[in-house]
Image (spheres, grey):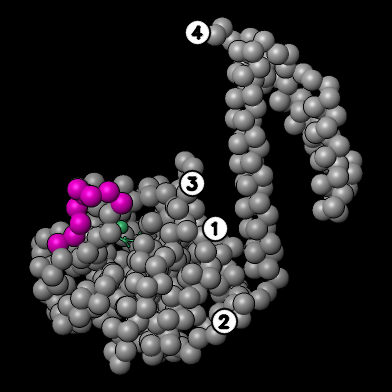
Amino acid sequence: MNASLDILPLSSWINTEGKPLIIAGPCSAETEEQMLETATQIKEEGFAHVIRAGIWKPRTRPGSFEGMGEAALPWLQAVRKETGMPVAVEVANPQHIELALKYDVDILWIGARTTVNPFNVQELADALKGVDVPVLVKNPVNPDLQLWIGALERLNQAGVKKLGAIHRGFSNAQETKFRNSPMWNIAIELKTLLPELPIIGDPSHMAGKRAYLYELAQRALDLNYDGLIIESHREPDKAWSDASQQLTPAALGQMLHDLHVRKESYGSDYQSQLEVVRGKIDHLDRELLENLAARMSLVERLAEYKRDNNVAAYQVDRFREVLETRAGWGKSLNLYPNLVDELFKLVHMESIRKQTEVMNQVNV
Ligand code: PEP
Ligand code: MN
């Protein structure tokens, strides 16, 4: 589906002197001192353009720290005054917008758990009619590019022209190295569809652990992202939320210093097309393996049943039937017959091995 946005370039609302936009600050505003000290240290490091802080925190489970709310907004005013830097907060409902604007917040962002809900996003868009404030939209938690684009369109149709996207990765169904899978191909597809839209990488929420921040930030820069948003706290290990992914301002300064900003253009070039296709292939391969694993657990159930009913693991008729039906399905999908045949012989062999293993287990 085609998409188009009527937006202003990033440089029209923030001056980064041609460098990637850097937004840094704690996951959450905790106390006035924590905010002021963290922000002052970030300013001294000299790399950041904007200070971020979460005031209303969407937590997965109740009982976690849910943010200081309105009480923290005057602290951000103090940060603005002390550092002279603009501040950004997450908003999730019209009341948040009203309060943030009342306390002079410069930039708003919409969190991943809000982008998923078009009703919610529309309410925010309606509340932003006639308001001249930049808004950054995080990707939805689920890997749905249309939902991400839809949220950007809703805001744009309400007149928000200072618009950008934040790529923070997508929820994992299984345990993986990263807290949220980057699925770079989705962000690249967004950039291909909407080349004028600034994209900011959020390696903090992708990583979940500070050890992975560098590689993710570098990857975002290699893809020519327009900026990075990274969580930084004066005492990361004592942070009230997202402690393991935060860095001290000094460590963040060092990391940003070590990153390489490359010059290649990105969008419709050859490299990014490759990236899109490879990303899709990766995704499909993972699904292939997930299906294989699901098939094996059914085989295990089958084996238990056979064991309990004293039936042999291997039944030649069933094997023949499996090969024949799969050959037919493969043919209708235009797959090379040998591929399908060899594949199911392998799958069947593994299935027999697994069943024999289960059937020989002592039934306790
Ligand atoms: C955050 O930026 O602290 C946050 C809650 O992020 P996300 O919406 O990406 O989970
Ligand atoms: Mn966070």
What residue is at 51 percent from the left and 60 percent from the top? 143
- The answer to whether the residue labelled 1 contacts the one labelled 4, judged by CB atoms less than 8 Å apart, is no
Q: Earlier in the sequence, mark 1 or mark 3?
A: 3
The amino acid at mark 2 is: Ala
Front position among marks 1 and 3? 3
Q: Quadrant of residue 2?
A: bottom right
Which residue corresponds to mark 1? 183
Q: Quadrant of residue 232?
A: bottom left
Q: Earlier in the sequence, mark 3 or mark 2?
A: 2
Q: Is residue 216 visible?
A: no
- The answer to whether the residue labelled 1 contacts the one labelled 3, judged by CB atoms less than 8 Å apart, is no
**In which quadrant of this rendering is ligand 2 seen?**
bottom left
The amino acid at mark 4 is: Val
Q: Quadrant of the N terminus?
A: bottom right
What residue is at 19 percent from the left and 53 percent from the top? 65
Which residue corresponds to mark 2? 3
Q: Looking at the image, which is closer to me, 153 or 163?
A: 153
Q: Looking at the image, which is closer to me, 253 or 355?
A: 355
Real-space CA distance between mark 3 and mark 4, rounded to the nearest whole angstrom = 32 Å
Real-space CA distance between mark 2 and mark 1, rounded to the nearest whole angstrom = 20 Å
Instruction: Tell me where the magenta segment starts and ends, as one range.
Output: 60-68
Which residue corresponds to mark 4? 364
Front position among marks 3 and 4? 4
Category of crowding for the residue at label 1, using alpha-carbon neighbours closer than 10 angstroms: few (below 14), some (14–19), many (at least 20): some
Front position among marks 1 and 4? 4
The amino acid at mark 3 is: Ala
Which residue corresponds to mark 3? 173
